[in-house]
């Protein structure tokens, strides 16, 4: 047994005595608490065991050692404290406490812990999901809860924001090959220069800001208009006058107005593009024969990966023609002499199916909303939200239509919330963590009683 699995076994003995543990692909952990009523669809609670690395150069910048797990009376400090070992441990604590309280579930409960979410999850959740699919079948799960969005105070209202959708994803690699030679007798344009021109052209043509009718952020705007005393008048007017079918050729004025709140809001409604990696050249006196860049895209609801490939191909064609280069646009040629080659990453994703948020008749969203308001008070508004990043749930779409990406812990005294994810001084308040345990305890029991 590996160290983390051994730690869980030591800390949660009742779980390991009462639940079935199946190990998937060496490190994947699947715990099953069998319910008494086999006709009820199971509930799945998810988290991932892995964390992002801590660069050696940043270790001295931490208030407490990044792998020390220090508790200072208010916060638990360390890498993974808020992404998302807090959620994993909260789930385990919940089940351990329920066993000690002699709770006997009617609905089967499955705990699913992958181990490589931070690098796309292919070996962890990518193996666990097919394992569960083979065992239970398609659309066999009542509800799935994984890490995700949490809470936001805006327009004078506190919102709980379970992610009911995720943007799509793709990386486009651009590779330019041009003749080399000695730098003392250069050509007018090198591969690096041409690549720079193409990158500039790409960045000069951002994707449109559009709010698709299926985009969960439209739901938050509607909730804000209905319940928030400080909801902007202009947004309210645009929301009221919005037509069901928005012409793609015309500006989406509601989306454009909402996007004025900043990039974090804008990119809920717009495909993002970011040139994150670039390389080229081998020596200062040698003309670069090859230069490449990778452009990351998070694809808006209502758009597809094909929209990205069409746009990048169109812009690349202009540069290829200008410099007399052959264009290989997603034709299987990764690179060739005197050419521009475009390739798409293997982990390309469509935008996730949007989870239903109906509340009548009773639904998993009803249970989640009721659990949240029961714990935190009736003044809190539970609204649909969208994730700009992707979680391990990308592999679980065939198992359930009811997938929620939600961090249910909240500390009203900690404005930072789940502070400093992926960076120095990552931490979570103990009150946040205890509330997460309370939430999971309520949610498991409420799901157990629900007739879904």
Image (tube, rainbow, N blue to C red):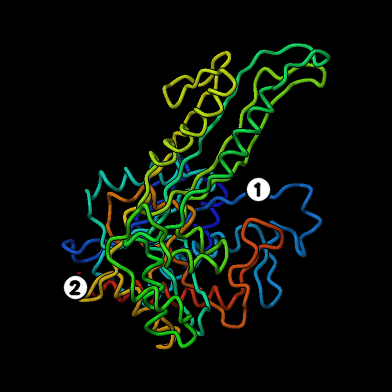
Q: Which residue matches tag 1?
A: 53
Q: Say which element carries label 1.
A: loop
Q: Is residue 263 left or right of residue 30?
A: right
Does residue 332 lie above or below 28 as drawn? above
* Residue 301 seen in the figure: yes
- Residue 370 versus residue 1: which sits nearer the camera? 370
Question: In the figure, residue 367 lies in which quadrant?
Answer: bottom left
Q: Say which element carries label 2.
A: loop
Quadrant of the image containing the C terminus? bottom left
The location of residue 360, given as percent across then percent down, is 21, 76
**What residue is shown at x 52% (from left), y 78% (from top)?**
154
The location of residue 19, given as percent across then percent down, is 36, 59
Question: In the figure, residue 323 lies in which quadrant?
Answer: top right
View extreme (left): residue? 39
**What residue is shown at x 66% (from left), y 23% (from top)?**
191
- Total label count? 2
């Amino acid at each position: 047994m590996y160290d983390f699995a051994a730690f869980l076994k030591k800390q949660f003995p009742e779980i390991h005595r009462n639940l079935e543990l199946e190990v998937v692909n060496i490190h994947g952990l699947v715990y099953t608490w069998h319910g008494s009523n086999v006709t009820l669809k199971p509930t799945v609670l998810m988290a991932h065991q892995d964390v992002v690395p801590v660069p050696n150069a940043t270790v001295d910048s931490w208030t407490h050692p990044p792998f020390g797990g220090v508790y200072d009376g208010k916060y638990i400090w360390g890498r993974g404290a808020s992404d998302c070992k807090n959620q994993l441990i909260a789930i385990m604590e919940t089940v351990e406490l329920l066993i000690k309280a002699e709770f006997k579930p009617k609905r089967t409960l499955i705990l699913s812990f992958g181990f490589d979410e931070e690098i796309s999850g292919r070996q962890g959740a990518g193996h666990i999901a097919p394992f569960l699919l083979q065992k239970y079948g398609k659309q066999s799960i009542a509800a799935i809860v994984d890490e995700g969005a949490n809470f936001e105070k805006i327009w004078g209202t506190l919102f709980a924001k379970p992610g009911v959708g995720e943007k799509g994803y793709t990386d486009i690699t651009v590779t330019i090959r041009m003749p080399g030679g000695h730098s003392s007798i250069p050509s007018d344009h090198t591969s690096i220069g041409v690549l720079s021109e193409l990158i500039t052209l790409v960045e000069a043509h951002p994707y449109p800001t559009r709010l698709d009718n299926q985009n969960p952020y439209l739901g938050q705007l509607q909730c804000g208009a209905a319940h928030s005393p400080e909801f902007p008048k202009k947004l309210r007017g645009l929301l009221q006058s919005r037509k069901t079918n928005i012409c793609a050729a015309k500006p989406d004025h509601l989306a454009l107005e909402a996007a004025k709140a900043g990039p974090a809001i804008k990119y809920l409604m717009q495909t993002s593009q970011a040139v994150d990696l670039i390389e080229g050249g081998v020596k200062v006196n040698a003309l670069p024969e090859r230069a490449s860049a990778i452009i990351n895209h998070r694809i808006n609801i209502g758009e597809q990966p094909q929209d990205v490939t069409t746009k990048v191909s169109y812009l690349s064609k202009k540069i290829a023609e200008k410099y007399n280069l052959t264009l290989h646009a997603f034709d299987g040629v990764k690179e060739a002499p005197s050419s521009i080659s475009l390739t798409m990453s293997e982990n390309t994703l469509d935008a996730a199916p949007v989870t239903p948020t109906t509340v009548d008749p009773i639904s998993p969203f009803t249970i989640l909303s009721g659990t949240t308001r029961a714990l935190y008070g009736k003044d809190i508004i539970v609204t649909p939200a969208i994730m700009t990043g992707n979680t391990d749930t990308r592999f679980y779409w065939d198992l359930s239509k009811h997938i929620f990406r939600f961090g249910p812990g909240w500390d009203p005294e900690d404005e930072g919330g789940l502070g400093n994810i992926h960076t120095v001084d990552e931490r979570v308040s103990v009150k946040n963590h205890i509330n997460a345990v309370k939430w999971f305890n309520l949610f498991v029991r409420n799901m157990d009683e629900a007739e879904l």
